[in-house]
Image (cartoon, rainbow, N blue to C red):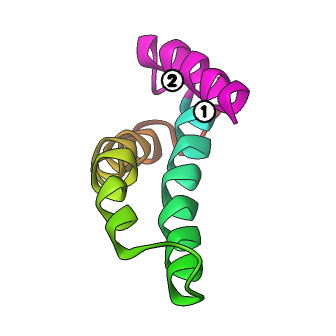
Amino acid sequence: MGMVIGVYGLGYWWASYAPLVHWPIVAVGLLGKLFGPIGYVINFSSGAAPAEFGYTLITNDLIWWVPFVLILRTVHLKTQWKLS
């Protein structure tokens, strides 16, 4: 788990210098931020995760939706998803 977090951190760091160029890293980050809450809902509904854990989603996942979506929207409008 720690290695995955470290790899995401490096990817975000590189993408922060030119997010419109490195938008695939931003897209993967957004997918992670979407699948995290989905996984929580599945685990919560099966009784495997306590309700209190949901609070961590606010700072860990949900607040990141806004900047990631804004970056990807800009990529779409300016580059039409080109990789160069």
Task: Say if mark 2 contacts mark 1, CB within 8 Å.
Answer: yes
**Residue to which mark 1 is pinned:** 25
Quarter of the image for residue 67 reads: top left
Residue at position x 62%, y 44% in the image? 28
Q: Give left or right: position of 14 versus 50.
A: right
Q: Secondary structure at mark 2?
A: helix
- Where's residue 18, x and y in %? 46, 16
**Residue to which mark 2 is pinned:** 12
Of the pair 41 and 32, the residue shown nearer to us: 41
Q: Give left or right: position of 61 versus 34.
A: left
Q: Give left or right: position of 25 versus 3.
A: left
Q: Residues within 10 Å of mark 2 (few under 14, many from 20)?
A: some
Q: Nearer the viewer, mark 2 or mark 1?
A: 2
Q: Secondary structure at mark 1?
A: helix
Q: Amino acid at mark 2?
A: Tyr
Residue at position x 38%, y 46% in the image? 60
Q: Is residue 42 shown above or below 84?
A: below
Tell me the quadrant of the picture where the C terminus can be found: top right
Q: Is residue 74 shown above or below 58?
A: above
Looking at the rendering, the stretch of residues picked out in magenta corresponds to: 1-22
Q: Residues within 10 Å of mark 1 (few under 14, many from 20)?
A: some
Helix, strand or loop for the magenta stretch, by majority:
helix
- Is residue 14 inside the magenta stretch? yes
Q: Give left or right: position of 53 versus 29.
A: left
